[in-house]
Image (cartoon, rainbow, N blue to C red):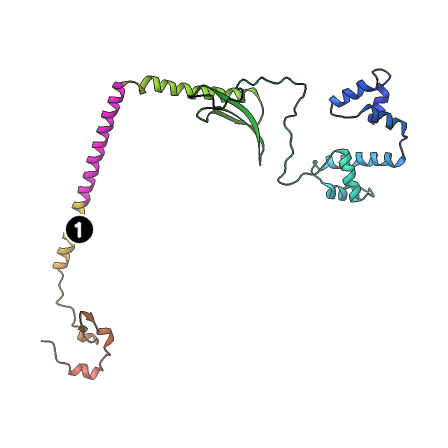
Amino acid sequence: MIVDYIDSQRERFGVEPVCAVLAEAGISIAPSTYYARSKTPLTDVELDEAYMANQLRSLWQNNWGVYGARKLWHAARRAGHDIGRDQVARLMKIAGISGVLRGKHRTITTRRGDAAPRHPDLVKRGWAAPTGIDQLWVADFSYVWTLAGFCYVAFVVDVFSRRILGWRVTTTKHTDMVTDALRQALQVRRRRRTRLCGRRFDPSFRRRVAIRLGRLHRRTARRRDRRLDRHRRRRAGQRLMRIDHRAVQDRSDQPHRTSLGRPPRRRMAGRPLGPLVQHRPASLLDRAPAPG
C-alpha cells in the first residue's frame, strides 16, 4: 500500500520528498526500499497475508484492542478463518498490534519532537547554589497511572528547603493545572512572610505571648489541683463509709462452724490446715463438746 501511494505521487513530487514526508508522519521507508520493492512483483501469498492482517486488525479492534495472539487466534477461528497461532502472532507483529498485559502499561502521553525548540537551562544544574528559602523554585508536571485511569500532577518545589509549596491533581491536562499550583505556592509564601514581618520580630508581641502562656499554665495547674483534691476527698469518704458499714454489721444470728458439718480449721505455723484434715463422721460430731 505504501509503494502504491509513492507510485501515485512520484510523478508530482518525486520519491525522496514523499519518503521524507512519510517519515515525518511516522511511516519510515527508505527510497532504496521502495525501488527494491517496485522491482519485485507482489506474490499471491503476500497478498493473502496482507488481507489476513487487515482482518485480524479488525477483529482486534472489535474486541476493545485487548486480545493477544492466543485469544485473537480463537476469535479468528470462530470467524471462519483457517489460520495457525504462530501465523497470527507474526501478522500481529507486522500490523503493529499487541495484547494488554495485567500490571504493564505502555500508554504514551507525550512524544518527543526532535524539531521542537528546547527551553534554556536557567538553573545551570546548580541545585546546591541557593543559601536560603525563596531563592530558587522549580516546577514540573507529570502523569500517574491509577486504577481509575491517568491523573496529572503539577507541583512547585523550593530548592533550598525541598518543600512542596503548591500542587494540583487533575484528570485532564490544561493550563489552569499549572497556574493553580503556582498560585498556591505564592499564597503560601505570602502568608509566611506576613507572619514573620508582622509578629516574629515585634518585642511587645513576644512579651504579650509570654504573659498569656504563663497565665494559661497557672490556670491549668489550678484546675489540676482542684481535680486532685476532689478525688482525694471522694476516696476518703468511700473508705469511711466502708468502715461504718462493717461496724454496724450484726453477726449474732450466724451459725457456728461446727454446726455446718465441717471441722474447724486448724493452723500450724501460721498456715490453715483445715482442707488437709479428714472429716469426722456424724456420730463423732454428736459427741463433740459444745463451744464454751
| Residue sitting at x 15%, y 49% | 237
Is residue 54 located in the magenta-colored stretch of the structure? no
Q: Is residue 245 visible?
A: yes
Dominant SS of magenta comes to helix
Residue 287 on image: x %, y %? 15, 83
Q: Looking at the image, which residue sits at the far top?
A: 12
Name the spot of residue 223 as percent of width and height, x first. Answer: 21, 36
The answer to which of 142 and 250 lies nearer the viewer is 142
Q: Which quadrant, please, contains the N terminus?
A: top right
Q: Position of residue 64 (x, y in %)?
A: 69, 36
Q: Vertically, is 125 above or below 264?
A: above
- Helix, strand or loop for disc 1: helix
Q: In what quadrant of the picture does the C terminus appear? A: bottom left
Measured along the vertical axis of the image, is residue 192 above or below residue 78?
above
Q: Is residue 78 in sight in this rendering?
A: no
Along the horizontal axis of the image, is 129 left or right of 276? Answer: right
In the image, which residues are magenta?
203-231
Q: Which corner quadrant of the image does residue 151 belong to?
A: top right
Q: Which residue is mark 1?
A: 238
Residue type at mark 1 is Gln
